[in-house]
Image: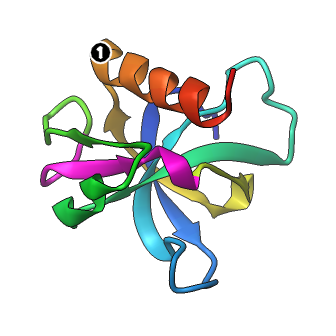
Amino acid sequence: MTLQRGDIHWIEFPVSSAREQSGRRPAIIAQADTAPSLPTVFVAPLASNLRASRFPGTFEVEASAGNGLQARSVVLAFQLRAIDRNRVKERLGSLNPQDLATLDAHLRSLLAL
């Protein structure tokens, strides 16, 4: 499966702590397209609970035909993580350029880049 930066896919997150997202949920492919041979990929999970937007490193994305989301969602950039590519499932859509730029800004701030 070809993964493109900014695409939103269903991801099978492993069960871990209560503070990390787990189970089947949408996430944004955050890794550059120039690293297709790596066995893992960086993703930023999404949450439908809008209360999650109270945390730093989050922003809301409106549902649209282009991104495939069914409801307004919160991008949890502060939960950026590497996952095995085998956990990446169906593609829903992709972020619009403005939302992708917002994700980039949050990642630069969180990682002090």
Residue 16 appears left or right of 89: right
Position of residue 104 relative to residue 85, above or below, is above
Q: Residue 110, can we see it?
A: yes
Seen at 40% across and 65% down, the residue is: 25
Position of residue 86 relative to residue 69, above or below, is below
Residue 35 appears left or right of 65: right
Exactly how many numbered labels are in the figure?
1
Which image quarter: residue 46? bottom left
Q: Position of residue 5 (x, y in %)?
A: 55, 26
Check the picture and name the quadrant holding the C terminus: top right
Q: Is 90 or 27 nearer to us in this picture? A: 27
Per the rendered image, the range of residues in magenta is 68-79
Position of residue 43 relative to residue 99, above or below, is below
Q: Position of residue 29 (x, y in %)?
A: 55, 38
Residue 22 magenta-drawn?
Answer: no
Check the picture and name the quadrant holding the N terminus: top right
Seen at 20% across and 64% down, the residue is: 51
Seen at 33% across and 36% down, the residue is: 93
Q: Amino acid at mark 1?
A: Gln
Which image quarter: residue 47? bottom left
Seen at 72% across and 44% down, the residue is: 41
Residue that carries the numbered disc 1 in the rendered image: 98
Residue 47 appears left or right of 62: right
The 10 Å Cα crowd at callout 1, few under 14, some 14 to 19, many 20 or more, is: few
